Amino acid sequence: MFLKKCQISRYGEVMNIAIDVRSILKKEKTGIGYYTFNLINALAKIDRNNDYALYSKIRFFSRDKKPPALPGENFRHKIDRFNLGPPVVLKNTDIFHTSAYDLKPPKGAKFVITVHDIIPKVFPQGHPKDVLEKLDNLLKSVLAAADVILADTKCTANDLKRHYSGQTGQKIKVLYPGVGDEFCVLPQEAKNLYKETLLKYNIYTNYIIYIGTIEPRKNINGLIKAYKALKSGHNIKQTLVITGMKGWMYDDVFKLTEELGLKKDIVFTGYVPCEDLKVLYNFADVSVYPSFYEGAGLPILEAFKCGCPVVTSNVSSMSELAGDAAVLTDPYKIDSIADGIYSVLSDVGLRNSLAQKGLKRAAEFSWDMTAKNLLEIFKGF
């Protein structure tokens, strides 16, 4: 085991582990923020031996702002200075872990980075060339500096090996994410208890749900066209609920909605917090995730955990995470997406079978297991 200082504390021999938690401080957390938040809490739950320093923004240490509550007694806050001047030298620190590559890798500790995806590299469409070059150089720098590179899925691991073989070498390990206990099955007979939540988002009928950022890679235009085909060809009555923040190049989505005459049939909720997301998953007829590319695709697992049948793409990590628990479709073919959705809407037996398979699949992904596997990686230094 790599220990710069094997010290004695109230927990015995400890590793001093520093973790970059800047992503959890955003008011409206998205994928990486939720990942870091859940990982930190899982580590606090299973590890009372090692000491943790959580690095966050300086602005959260001002008089009028407080940093988030610490998850355990062996955790403490530290101020992030990673991009101020030369690389920071971490003292009395054995391991530094981050999910970001917009920082100067610190010195003095083993450096572990989690790469959730390399979307700008494998799906560069729409990104300005100068932005792509900047991101590429940043990623090369942190990958070269890393002692261990963690990938959420085998798909991302393979992408890293293919595009950054010169920087990754034999340093890549797959560490699957978990799906939080905040996602769970709610009793259908309790639907009236959650009616206010649905009404808050202008949901009044049965619905199909998409959850994710509104941007070209997510293939929302393809979903809308498939939805139009289902209304025209099968006269389906479900509303299409599109949940998530505006990303970039989102105007086309709203323009297409108007062009197809679907303004009254599609609900755009904007950002939805986790406590409401589980309600939306639970009472949806089907969750559709038709993305062209994902490094992980956590909404698939979230829907599974809520007992919601899933239709998703047969590419990248989506088929890897879904296994045999979802209907897989070709994201480049509108008919394929439409047929996949209709197969679920029209077949109660399939819908129930997918719900049960999804629950079993989701049980294979827990944050406790992710944290346990991460600790084993740390101990391997």
Image (cartoon, grey):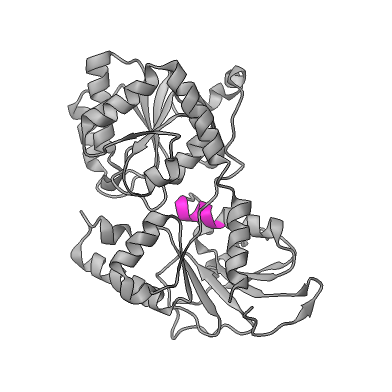
Which of the pair 291/313 is nearer the observer? 313
Give how far across and how far down residue 212 sits, in percent: 39, 42
Count the labels in the image.
0
Give the residue furthest to the right: 10
Residue 355 drawn at (x, y percent): 50, 28
Q: Identify the image quadrant of residue 183.
A: top right
Residue range (magenta): 31-36
> Residue at point 42% right, 58% down?
116
Let me know if residue 374 is in the magenta part. no
At 26% from the left edge and 46% from the top edge, which residue is drawn?
Answer: 216
Out of 196 and 381, give the one closest to the viewer: 381
Looking at the picture, does residue 70 appear above or below residue 344?
A: below
Residue 151 position in % (x across, y down):
44, 61
Residue 44 lies left or right of residue 292; in this view the side is right
Q: Is residue 363 visible?
A: yes
Which of the image's four quarters has the C terminus?
Answer: bottom right
| Left or right of residue 39, residue 130 in this image | left
The vertical placement of 276 against 76, above or below, is above
Query: Relative to 166, is 93 on the left or the right?
Result: right
In which quadrant of the rendered view does residue 127 lie? Answer: bottom left
> In the figure, 317 relative to 327: above or below?
below
Q: Position of residue 88 (x, y in %)?
A: 50, 83
Q: Is residue 276 visible?
A: no
